[in-house]
Image (cartoon, rainbow, N blue to C red):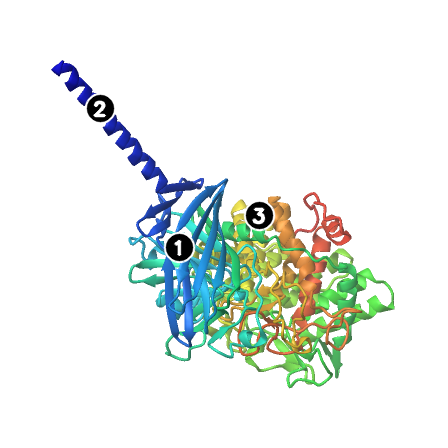
Amino acid sequence: MRKHRNSLVISCAFLLAATGAQRSLAAARADRLELGRVPAGAAVVFTRSSAGWGLTVGGSGGPELSQPEPARIQVSDGPGEIRELAAAYKTATRTGDALDASADLKDVQGVSFQVHDEWRLKGDVLSVQRTVSVHGTAPGGFDSAVLFDIQRSTTWDDVNYLAPGVLYADPTYDGVHSPGGTLNFAAHHLMVREDILPAPMFGMYFKDGASVTMLDPMPRGDTTEDESKLTQPEMTDSRFQFGSLGVWQQQSGVQFGFRYPASVDDFSRSHGDGPPQWVRRFHPIQAGFSQSYQVDFRLAHAPNFREFSRESWRWSWDTLRPAVNQIDVLMVRRVLMDHLAAQVTQIDGHTGVPFVLSTMNDVHNWNWTMVAMGFVGKDLDCADALLQEGDRDPGPRGQHMRKLGLAMISTMIQALPTVPLPATGIDLTTGQPWDHIWLSPWLRNATEDMRVLMLAYRREKKLGRDHPEWIAWVRQYADWLIQQQRPDGSFPRRWKPSSNEAVEPSGTASYNAVPVLVLMSEETGDPKYRQSALRAAEYTWTNYGSRGLFIGGASDNPNITDKEAGMLSLDAFLSLYEDDKDPKWLDRAKAAGDFAESWIWIWNLPMPADADNAQLHWKKGVPTVGLQGITALHAGGADEYLDCAVGLYARLYNYTRDPHYLEVTRVLLDDTKSMVALPGRLYDMKGPGWQQENFGLGPGPRGRGVGSHRLWLPWISANHLHGINSLEEYDPALFRSLTSGTHTQSSPSTGDQSQW
């Protein structure tokens, strides 16, 4: 009997122990909710502590990310008087493929903020849809943020950072005070308003290949005129509908995330060695007011920073889906051609396109008789467009244009007959070289227009028109140029007039020499030109392109990260690929093209609602898709320079069959013409064909939608026309497809592959 009682006691003990274990397991499960795992294996887990629910991401390599207090609010009681509110989620519930979480944050003013987040995981993208509701009214303003802490073992230097048009890992060439520049980087503090970004994204690439990219997938960008002019460092307004993205070092480690509305702390408004300045934007603390926004986080891996940049940008492109606002390309070309021909000026037998003209009136600028090669002058590019129109139009109009084009080429050759060049442009009133830094012997200025002249020479020769003086002039320059090449394959950016002495010895722009040297090798059969081109291209790739970075395209912004460097490198690498079909040059062309396209605006940024449309340069309601950032030094400034690369991306598409490059081709063909004055759509310009040079999208003293001037430079029309003509000449079938509204894909071109 005693033995039976002992067995019963033991059995009860085991039963109680098992029940306790099950209860402990159930409790553990109740305190842990797994949303899912990304393809690389990292788990997204919500865990409850005594404070409430928090969030962690990690567990399979890569950085450990955490949000112990996901609900974060800043409250402003006045300039510089900021209070931080943070809390764990009070509730977290799994509902289908989403996890709903909420928190209540109470402020000392008797106001409370209810935060409701809906988290989802789809593939490698973790997204949160946030709504913040205000209960109660108080002075001041508030913002909210979605922030992640990175594991303590990760340091600032363990990460490479990406902000398109702002920073590509290396800040060395981004300027000192710019958002992605050296001061902000050295301070371990990178914060960027999304209204200066071609895509509202910010990425981080870790040493082990893991990456995190943030994106606002539904950006709005609304603002007011005063806000866009930065009239006050701190402002509160319900109309602010833009956020900021970034990463910064804290004592506890590295933190990154999205703040809405935007607040940034950087050196862009500082002077000299002054400290960084805050620009804070808040929403009003009013009963019934609410915020709503979404942030996506792409959690992926890539073999190097270059591939990470490419994939992050394409993810942004596919998410934002930039619309093609199709235009009548043939009509636009005719308008631009008639406009260009009307600007050609002849003075005492010297013919050219003036360097600068007003889009608003007929008042002449001090340098209007300046005529320049390449970059922003593109006199010979304009001449080539006139020659091509002469072939399209056999009537008096076309023949008049042909005569103008021939006269322009003759004028330039006669004015600059010897090397070293005394300048890269002339004064129409004298026919002599113009002594100004803008027209100094820049590598880019001469080689860019001489390349176009070589293409015109080739086209004319096929039509039975020989111009031996053209090729002799370019060959003389090319022979001099290869003597200037240094042992490492680089060329200086600029020389002293009529001298072999370099004024800007940096080799960052060496890609400029490649296309004209390849053409000269093809035309003469002399391999020395090609060998020189190969060495220059290898230098560019080894020192910059292999890192996903291209420098020094804009002549007036020496050694600054810019889109034109990517565009010109794309042309250089494609020239070599088409010459010898070595696949490495196509791979390098893709890298340059991927970099250059990341400056294209792929979302529509509205102009300030309260601004006077008559005072805006970029008018209300006109899509900003297709505009491009200019340089990292002046992030937020934009122009349409990449419109001349339509043919380049068409070539990439045909060689790779990658449909993304066809999408880029479409955007550059159509969307870049949004601010060209056309019949029935003059905006405030003096006639059809005019367009000013640049526009401001980011904040600054002039405000959003206002450029630095209302002037037209020849590159504007030259680039529009070059993009249209190069596509038609390279692939007529694709051109017909993209200009007919059918947008069907063509077969690979078998035409002249040296054209763009």
Reading the image, the residue beneath label 3 is 580
* Drawn side of residue 208 relative to residue 329, left or right: left
Which residue does the image show at 54% across and 77% down from the upper left? 498
At label 3, the amino acid type is Asp
* Drawn side of residue 430 relative to residue 132, left or right: right
Q: The C terminus lies in which quarter of the figure?
A: bottom right
Q: Is residue 230 above or below residue 289?
A: below
The label nearer to you, 3 versus 1, is 1
Q: The N terminus lies in which quarter of the figure?
A: top left
Say what secondary structure mark 2 lies in: helix
At label 2, the amino acid type is Cys
Reading the image, the residue beneath label 2 is 12
Which numbered tag is attached to residue 70? 1
Which numbered tag is attached to residue 45? none
Question: Which residue is nearer to you in this view: 604 or 225?
Answer: 225
At label 1, the amino acid type is Pro
Q: Residues within 10 Å of mark 3 (few under 14, many from 20)?
A: few
Q: Is residue 7 above or below residue 725?
A: above
In the rendered image, residue 742, in percent from the top left (x then y), is placed at: 75, 48
Q: Taking the image as drawn, is residue 283 in sight?
A: yes
Question: Which residue is nearer to you in this view: 718 or 262?
Answer: 262
In the rendered image, residue 354, in percent from the top left (x then y), is placed at: 69, 78
Distance from disc 2 to disc 1, alpha carbons, whole Å, reads 44 Å
* Quadrant of residue 266 within the rendered picture: bottom left
Q: Residue furthest front?
A: 1
Q: Is residue 202 above or below residue 59?
A: below
Q: Residues within 10 Å of mark 1 (few under 14, many from 20)?
A: many
Distance from disc 3 to disc 1, alpha carbons, whole Å, reads 56 Å
